[in-house]
Amino acid sequence: MKILIYGLNYAPELTGIGKYTAEMAETLVRFGHDVRVVCAPPYYPEWQVAQGYSAWRYRCEVVRGVQLWRAPLWVPHKPGGVARMLHLATFALASLPLVLRQAFWRPDVVMAIAPTLMCAPAAALLARLTGAKSWLHVQDFEVDAAFNLGLLKRASAARIAHALERALLHRFDVVSSISDKMVERARRLGVDAAKVFSLPNWVDTSVIYPLGRASDYRRELDIPAGDKVVLYSGNMGSKQGIELLAQAAARLVERADIRFVFCGNGATKADLMRRCEGLPNCRFMPLQPAERLNELLNLADIHVLPQRGDAADLVMPSKLTGMLASGGAIIAMARPETELYAVVAERGVVVEPENVEALVGAITGLADDPLRRAMLGEAARRFAEESLAPAAVLGRFDVRLGQLLRNAGAKGHAVRPGA
């Protein structure tokens, strides 16, 4: 089967959407499919094009059996609302010739990854031109996120954006998303129930697992054996709410046995470092190599997942899967009606979004109770093994792809040899 994946981010060495897109493509190749990807050069989360790549040139390369067609784009130094929209628009425009060029390849399935939804029209057009089946995978409902986070504010703009979003969703043969709540959101937007599909983010539990020993990072950061580490690892962006952790660290500065470690990059990292300036219980680390991710996650006695109250029901944080697989105790900020709450509540601690007092109480409670930390960590690991292993998630995905092509053949459409 020939599968074209069209998405902004493709970076197997990082975490987040770029890593999931890469793992999806590489797994499909191992399943015997011919896979091409149209994407941007790696630039996220630093908001700077990686060394060895150009923001202004097209590039084709083959990485682990996947043919990548990289399109140029403008990367803003300060990704605010308007700048971010222009950034996405430059990729949508620059990548359009690459997408249309794939018509000569004649894919069987065209899959668009959102964000960015701006690329969805080109994916739908290519599928129509070639007779391919179309698939839209939603990692984040961008329109809701943009308005709830204040990136876009006018009511008239909201109506227009939601109408365009609804129209685009209806043009795809399959619409998938990463949580049950987000799948429900697609149905509320009018997508037929037969067309929606749950495709959660996965985690390789053979790569991320409890070490059973102290992480090497504890020695490298000179953290004493008896101290408890509260770890935030991931993108430091506007919707993460990581400023709440700075407030918690300030409240707990007298607890010499509790250390906060922040690892990653992003638009708000400089602000977070300013907030933590002078706090001896805070350490900062840049993004670490992918091969050390398990060592990093095992540094945590307590993983923290802050969330702004206006974002908690829009996204299912990709970093959560690694936390679960590493077998550490988790504290998440989420409202009871959200998917994040449902996943963490039975195997971690959930507190109200933006409630710093509750966050501080949860941290001190777990820091002082090693038995509870161990029990929650074991439950988290068990859930990752049973529900989030790639063989289960991507195996279901491959089956659905096969059904999609067989259904097309049953309706009288030609299915090309090898599909």
Image (cartoon, rainbow, N blue to C red):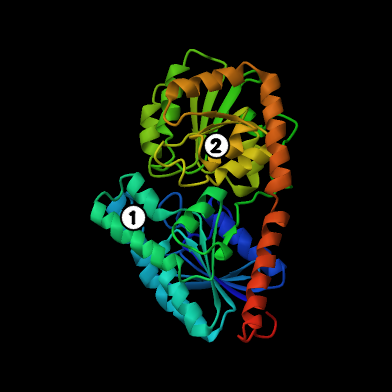
Classify residue 318 as left or right of residue 123: right
Looking at the image, can residue 53 be seen? Answer: yes
Residue 349 placement (x, y as % from top left): 58, 28
Residue at image position (34%, 66%) is 90
Residue underneath mark 1: 84
Residue 186 placement (x, y as % from top left): 48, 57
Question: Which corner quadrant of the image does residue 417 belong to?
Answer: bottom right
Looking at the image, can residue 118 be seen? Answer: no
Image quadrant in which the C terminus is located: bottom right
Look at the picture and state if 175 lies above or below 36.
Answer: above
Look at the picture and state if 419 lies above or below 287.
Answer: below
Mark with earlier residue (1, 2)? 1
Residue underneath mark 2: 341
Real-space Cα separation, disc 1 to disc 2, in angstroms? 29 Å
Look at the picture and state if 9 lies above or below 37.
Answer: above
Residue count near mark 1 (Cα–Cα under 10 Å), binned few <14, some 14–19, many ≥20: some
Classify residue 276 as left or right of residue 415: left
Residue 346 placement (x, y as % from top left): 64, 33
Residue at image position (43%, 49%) is 46
Residue 351 placement (x, y as % from top left): 51, 28
Label 1 or label 2, whichever lies nearer to me, is 2
Q: Which mark, residue 228?
A: none
Question: Which corner quadrant of the image does residue 223 belong to?
Answer: top right
Kindly state the secondary structure of the residue where label 2 is placed.
helix
Residue at image position (62%, 82%) is 411
Kindly state the secondary structure of the residue where label 1 is placed.
helix
Look at the picture and state if 152 lies above or below 376.
Answer: below
Q: Type of residue at label 2? A: Tyr
Q: Type of residue at label 1? A: Arg
Q: Residue furthest top?
A: 254
